[in-house]
Image: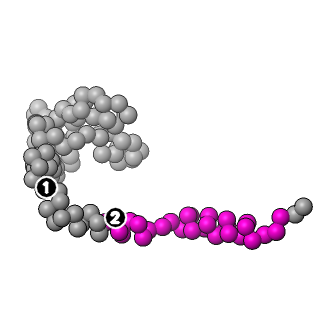
Amino acid sequence: MRQEKTMKIIANHAMDPRIKLEPNVGSDRSWVWSAYDFAEGELKETVFALRFADSDIAQTFKKHFEEAQAEMEKLLAGEDKPGEDGGKAADEAAEALAGLSTKEGEEEGKDKDKDEEKPKAQ
């Protein structure tokens, strides 16, 4: 998660299924939770709090947060079943990636060819 104005990383943690999202005391539009965060380059336990413009947005956040936790729980339980298709999807992705190139890399190659064609002054 990044701060809206500065784009500074302010939350970088796994969606651990054990994290408990709690309502902030006295507010129906804010949430508090604790997680091991890596936003500043080192792993440390951090307490997070988010306040939203209204309770509907807060409830939507909670819904998506809990969906992400459920997905992570499935992954941790091995329910993603890697290789179920015999590795076909991974092979297709690798094939697609192998065919990619960057313009920068192509231009460097062209410049190199031009240098090789030029006779060197003696």
Q: Is residue 70 left or right of residue 47?
A: left
Examine the rendering and report whether any part of residue 52 can be seen.
yes
The image shows residue 24, relative to residue 91, as above or below, that is above
Image mark for residue 80: 1
Q: Main secondary structure of the magenta part?
A: helix
Element on which disc 1 rests: loop
Asked if the residue at tag 1 contacts the one at tag 2, i.e. Cβ–Cβ closer than 8 Å, the answer is no
Q: Residue at (90%, 61%) from the top-left corner? A: 122
Among all residues in the image, which is located at the extreme right?
Answer: 122
Q: Which residues are magenta?
A: 93-120
How many neighbours does mark 2 have within 10 angstroms: few (below 14), some (14-19), or many (20 or more)? few
Residue 62 locus on image (x, y percent): 12, 47
Among all residues in the image, which is located at the extreme front?
Answer: 86
Q: Residue at (35%, 68%) from the top-left corner? A: 95
Image mark for residue 94: 2
Examine the rendering and report whether any part of residue 66 can be seen.
no
The image shows residue 104, relative to residue 34, as above or below, that is below
The image shows residue 67, relative to residue 91, as above or below, that is above
Q: CA distance from mark 2 to mark 1?
A: 19 Å
Image quadrant of residue 45? top left
Q: Nearer the viewer, mark 2 or mark 1?
A: 2
Looking at the picture, tell me which residue is in the foreground, 79 or 60: 79
Q: Residue at (64%, 70%) from the top-left corner? A: 110
